[in-house]
Amino acid sequence: MSNGPAGHVARSTVRPNSETTRRTPMRTFLYTDDGVTIDSVYDPGAVVYDASRPPADDLVFVVAHGFTGDVDKPHVGRVAEAFTRQGAVVTFSFRGHGASGGRSTVGDREVLDLAAAVRWARELGHARVVTVGFSMGGSVVLRHAAIYGENGGTAPERGAERGAHTDAVVSVSAPARWYYRGTPHMRRLHWLVTRPEGRLVGRYGFRTRIHHREWNPVPMSPVEAVPRIAPTPLLIVHGDRDGYFPLDHPRMLARAAGDHGELWLEPGMGHAEHAAGDALLERIGHWAVSQGG
């Protein structure tokens, strides 16, 4: 992948004959509002040129990975590749993950990382941004949409500047509430985050550097964020075999969204990116395109 400056993207014109063209991705580091460097990749995707209609250059997916993921992990790359069939894609590594700076706060300050990625996507010329988050990233896209709402949001910690808002939100395999320890997977994750020896495993086993400090104050929970997202379109996706968060989590989120949100409970699906098959990712992409108006 080649490095490229933020704010520049090659534009193409419609060609006489229908064809598919793959444009060159770019990779760079973004800076968050609190000064953390975020490793980020922009993939313009596979654009289908057709004389009867212009390419949909306005749509971009910004993908927020799960805990211990990063832009170089194969499961994150597979998700990004699937969405390039529907539009451009921005992927990035959350703070403390991969080559990004800082330390992971496990869903708190990561909202600033997503805001930087969304802002970059708009600087590249995209008018429509769809944020898609998985697990921890799923909680981040919910809180981000509440804080950086196009109409200003209501959360006190939101950024004042415009340009970081999203036009649609997809949250996959997200928790509804914090501190959940009801499954073996989540008890192991809490050990990883809260114990010194666990954080060593995170650093050297998963390329994830975890902050040792507890949240202070505790951030707004996903279920508290959901009612503040309207009128931005919202899709909640969850597997009925999720080993981390059982079905009461997506149902809590859906109840909080009311008539505004849409809930897909996926039969046989496990947790997050690893469990999201190509067919599901394609359906999510079609949902995102349908929100264009």
Image (spheres, rainbow, N blue to C red):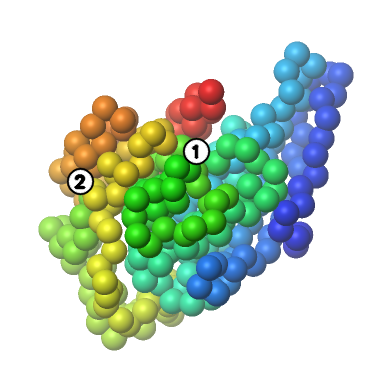
Asked where in the image residue 171 lies, by quadrant, the reply is: top left
State how far apart marks 1 and 2 are (Cα): 24 Å
Q: Residue at x 50, y 38 (%)?
A: 167
The residue nearer to you, when weighing 163 against 124, is 163
N-terminal of the two: label 1 or label 2? 1
Percent x, y of residue 180: 17, 60
> Which disc, if any, is residue 249?
2
**Label 2 neighbour load within 10 Å: few <14, some 14-19, many 20+:** some
Are discs 1 and 2 less than 8 Å apart at CB? no
Residue shown at the point (84%, 19%) measured from the top left: 17
Label 1, residues with CA under 10 Å away: few <14, some 14-19, many ≥20: many
> What label sits on residue 167 in the rendered view?
1
Residue at the image point whose x is 22% and y is 40% from the top = 256
Name the residue rendered at 48%, 43% in the picture: 150
Residue at the far right in the pictured view: 16
* 146 in relation to 196, above or below: above
> Picture coordinates of residue 194 (x, y %)?
25, 78
**Is residue 74 visible in this depiction of the protein?**
no
- Horizontally, is 155 left or right of 3 in the view? left
Task: Please state the horizontal and vertical placement of residue 86, each as a whole percent of the image.
Answer: 59, 32
User: What residue type is disc 2 on?
Assistant: His
How many marks do you count on the picture? 2
Quick one: SS at disc 1?
A: loop
Left or right of 144 on screen, residue 83? right
Q: Specify the amino acid type for callout 1.
A: Asp
Q: Which mark is residue 51?
A: none
In the image, which is nearer the foreground, mark 1 or mark 2? 1
User: In the figure, residue 21 lies in which quadrant?
Assistant: top right
Q: Is residue 33 visible?
A: yes
Q: Nearer the viewer, residue 114 or 27?
A: 114
